[in-house]
Amino acid sequence: MALTKLKIESYSTPACTGGALGSLDAMFNPETYTRNFDVSYKTSTEANRNEPTLLFRGVDGSDLTLDLIVDGTGLVPIPGATTVDAYITNFKKLVYRYQGTQHRPNYLKITWANLTFIGVCKNINITYTLFNQDGSALRAKIKATFSKSVDYSTKAKEAQKSSPDLTHIRTVKAGDTLPLMTYRIYGDSAYYLQVAEANNLTSVADIKPGDQIYFPPIKK
């Protein structure tokens, strides 16, 4: 079975579909790679609180960090280049450089075995570890971090699967109050007056078990 090399492809569109603008194979597959996942919260702002309450804001996405080695000592051919410096130039042009026709760097697809990652380059750190007598690089380590990016069309389809209606309708249960129900939906009870207005309630206390309350999309 032929060795599968990690491949980075560049695209002009965030979905990374159609023909790639360019591609680059890793010279050596990484021994490890790192995935980082972030979730964003904000701290509640009620007065005189004695403990923080974290309110969910959103999933911030994930990062992929790769450590790639480029070796020009002749052990194996350098993919798409004859020198370490040339490979690094190609790498930077593909993943990092500002593209005038797009007014931004490329969108990227990274594939290797079971890994498929679509996103953009966040940063690159290059460490040179071996040199020719003329000072040109013989070996270098590229540490690159990529941030996940999902195109709007895909994101809308995923949202539709998990929540077919961006609005919410809830049935009032015993013990429910409008601020409490509002907190459950939006993560912040401060929007209860807007919910009351949307439901034509004359008072926030004007709900009883069995009532159905409409919670509209609210711009936060």
Image: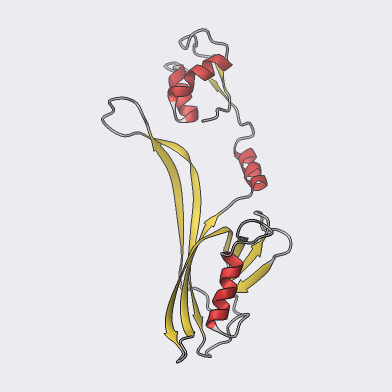
Residue 216 placement (x, y as % from top left): 58, 24
Eyeballing the image, is 9 above or below 207?
A: below
Residue nearest the observer in this picture, 84 or 6: 84
Q: Residue at x 58, y 65 (%)?
A: 95
Q: Residue at x 67, y 69 (%)?
A: 22
Q: Residue at x 61, y 31 (%)?
A: 166
Task: State the residue lying farthest toward the right.
Answer: 18
Regarding residue 129, the answer to whether it shows in the image is yes
Image quadrant for the N terminus? bottom right
Q: Is residue 130 left or right of residue 1?
A: left
What residue is rendered at 46% in x and 28% in y? 184
44 and 181: which is toward the camera? 44
141, 17: nearer the viewer = 141
Image coords of residue 31 (percent x, y): 46, 73
Q: Is residue 43 above or below residue 32?
A: above
Residue 135 rendering spot, x and y as whole percentages? 46, 86
Name the one closer to the observer, 18 or 12: 12
* Quadrant hosting residue 98: bottom right
